[in-house]
Image (cartoon, rainbow, N blue to C red):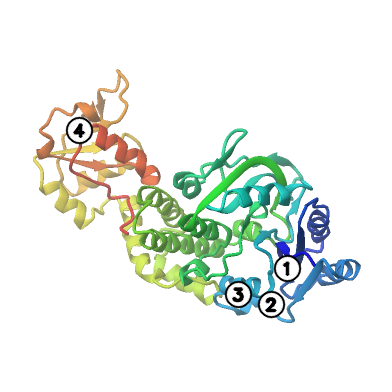
């Protein structure tokens, strides 16, 4: 009998409203190779197992159900690691194509297109593609287009890490069955698709096709995306988990993609410090969330202290970090970079801490921008001071740290500090 080339791996829980669409998409595939369909049901409490068994009975040589009697997601600490072990034990194919039970495929040649590329490009470990995004609340649908335009391309580190236009859909992923475990911190992260994509990127190339071949449902019944918007504690746990994962991934890759990692880390740091009532200490909120059963990665408490300091820098007018106080003493001239909300905070903090500064700098200066808070405004590249004797305080939310670094380098700024950047 012909060997199985692709294992379709579907993980489902309480997807009775959607699982038929997923299975029909699997069955519709037109290929010149043999594939199998494995569906793991994590002890659903609705009719999902019954529907899977119905299809399994009709297609016994093609569909194989794996049924849990207890929900493993809720009882297994490293559920992702446990799930990958199950995947490795059951998937026979050279390639694995994933699709969660509430998503579905709409192109009958999806597997053939992706396998053809992988067979012709052994350096490629993961194939992804464009999809439609279906909002289950209002039934609207749009094209995801995570990478603009009609294209076939290998994804760069910047594109993969930053996800400027959203994440590549999980149901688009087809990867080589390399049968190896990722380091544990990958499994501790609150999501599995993004972390697997990053891991694959460290081992080989990731190819993207703009061909639309699947549908991603969001805000579906009991979905993770919907619960994130409903429960503040869950969102806090998610943001902390992503922050810790990205910090560890940065170390794991030897800081090879550091300028992009800082951007992404800062996005989650900003989400955390802006989501919790400033009258509540982050450490206290963290304990409340843990007591409610929300999961946190190791070292979370260590970074809570750093996040608290960052939050004070943003919200406490009288606060000025020790690092910032030491920095301003080192130079004859201090200039504040930026003219937005964060620069106003720095002005107030400097005033209350009796710190003098010369004025403001901006990367692009309009002609009429001569004064701000009674101080002169210069273009960053035209500061009228000795660069060696000038320190620049970056009063900008550093969610695009790479752009800030480009501006500093272009202006030949050698000495700078950003008090709003999380220490990592």
Q: Which residue is mark 1?
A: 13
Q: Which residue is mark 2?
A: 71
Q: Residues within 10 Å of mark 1 (few under 14, many from 20)?
A: many
Kindly identify which numbered label has been placed on residue 240.
none
Label 2 – label 4 distance at C-alpha: 60 Å
Where residue 400 sits, quadrant-wise, is top left
Q: How many marks?
A: 4
Residue depicted at 71% across the width and 73% down the height: 42
Label 1 – label 2 distance at C-alpha: 9 Å
Where residue 79 sits, quadrant-wise, is bottom right
Q: In this rendering, does residue 355 appear at all?
A: yes
Q: Nearer the viewer, residue 269 or 409?
A: 409
Q: Which residue is mark 4?
A: 359
Label 3 – label 4 distance at C-alpha: 59 Å
Residue 301, image x, y percentages: 38, 71
User: Which mark's residue is nearer the viewer, 3 or 4?
Assistant: 3
Residue depicted at 57% across the width and 47% down the height: 207
Sequence-wise, which precedes: disc 1 or disc 2? 1
Residue depicted at 32% across the width and 51% down the height: 421
Q: Residues within 10 Å of mark 4 (few under 14, many from 20)?
A: many
Q: Nearer the viewer, residue 409 or 91?
A: 91
Residue 414, image x, y percentages: 18, 41
Label 4 – label 1 distance at C-alpha: 58 Å
Q: Nearer the viewer, residue 239 or 152?
A: 152
Sequence-wise, which precedes: disc 1 or disc 3? 1
Label 2 with label 4: CB-CB less than 8 Å: no
Q: Is residue 148 above or below residue 122?
A: above
Label 1 with label 2: CB-CB less than 8 Å: yes
Judge from the rendering whether residue 66 lies leftward or rightward of residue 416; answer left or right.
right
Secondary element at tag 3: helix
Q: Which residue is mark 3?
A: 85
């Amino acid at each position: 009998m012909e060997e199985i080339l692709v294992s379709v791996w579907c993980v489902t829980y309480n997807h009775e409203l959607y699982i038929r669409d997923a299975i029909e998409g699997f069955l519709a595939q037109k290929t010149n190779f043999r594939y199998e369909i494995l569906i793991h049901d994590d002890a659903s409490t609705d009719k999902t197992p019954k529907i899977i068994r119905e299809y399994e009975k009709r297609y016994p040589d093609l569909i194989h159900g794996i049924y849990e009697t207890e929900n493993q997601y809720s009882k297994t600490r490293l559920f992702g690691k446990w799930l990958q072990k199950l995947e490795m034990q059951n998937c026979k194919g050279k390639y694995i194509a994933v699709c969660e039970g509430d998503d579905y495929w709409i192109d009958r040649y999806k597997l053939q297109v992706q396998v053809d590329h992988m067979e012709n490009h052994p350096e490629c470990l993961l194939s992804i593609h464009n999809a439609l995004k279906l909002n289950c609340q209002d039934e609207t649908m749009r094209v995801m287009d995570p990478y603009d335009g009609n294209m076939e391309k290998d994804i760069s580190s910047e594109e993969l890490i930053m996800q400027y236009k959203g994440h590549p859909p999980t149901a688009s992923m087809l990867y080589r069955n390399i049968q190896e475990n990722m380091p544990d911190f990958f499994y501790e992260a609150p999501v599995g698709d993004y972390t697997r994509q990053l891991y694959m990127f460290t081992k080989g190339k990731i190819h993207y096709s703009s061909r639309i071949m699947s549908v991603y449902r969001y805000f579906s019944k009991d979905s993770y995306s919907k619960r994130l918007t409903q429960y503040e504690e869950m969102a806090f746990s998610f943001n902390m988990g992503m922050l810790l994962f990205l910090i560890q991934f940065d170390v794991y890759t030897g800081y090879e993609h550091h300028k992009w990692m800082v951007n992404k880390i800062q996005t989650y740091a900003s989400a955390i410090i802006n989501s919790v009532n400033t009258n509540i200490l982050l450490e206290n909120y963290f304990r409340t969330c843990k007591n409610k059963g929300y999961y946190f990665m190791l070292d979370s408490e260590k970074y809570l202290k750093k996040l608290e300091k960052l939050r004070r820098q943003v919200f406490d007018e009288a606060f000025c970090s020790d690092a910032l106080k030491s920095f301003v003493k080192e130079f004859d001239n201090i200039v504040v970079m930026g003219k937005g909300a964060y620069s106003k905070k720095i002005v107030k903090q400097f005033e209350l801490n009796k710190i003098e500064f010369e004025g403001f700098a901006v990367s692009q200066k309009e002609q009429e921008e001569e004064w701000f808070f009674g101080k002169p405004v210069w273009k960053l590249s035209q500061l009228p001071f000795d660069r060696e004797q000038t320190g620049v305080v970056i009063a900008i939310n550093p969610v695009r740290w790479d752009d800030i670094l480009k501006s500093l380098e272009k202006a030949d700024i050698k000495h700078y500090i950003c008090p709003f950047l999380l220490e990592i």
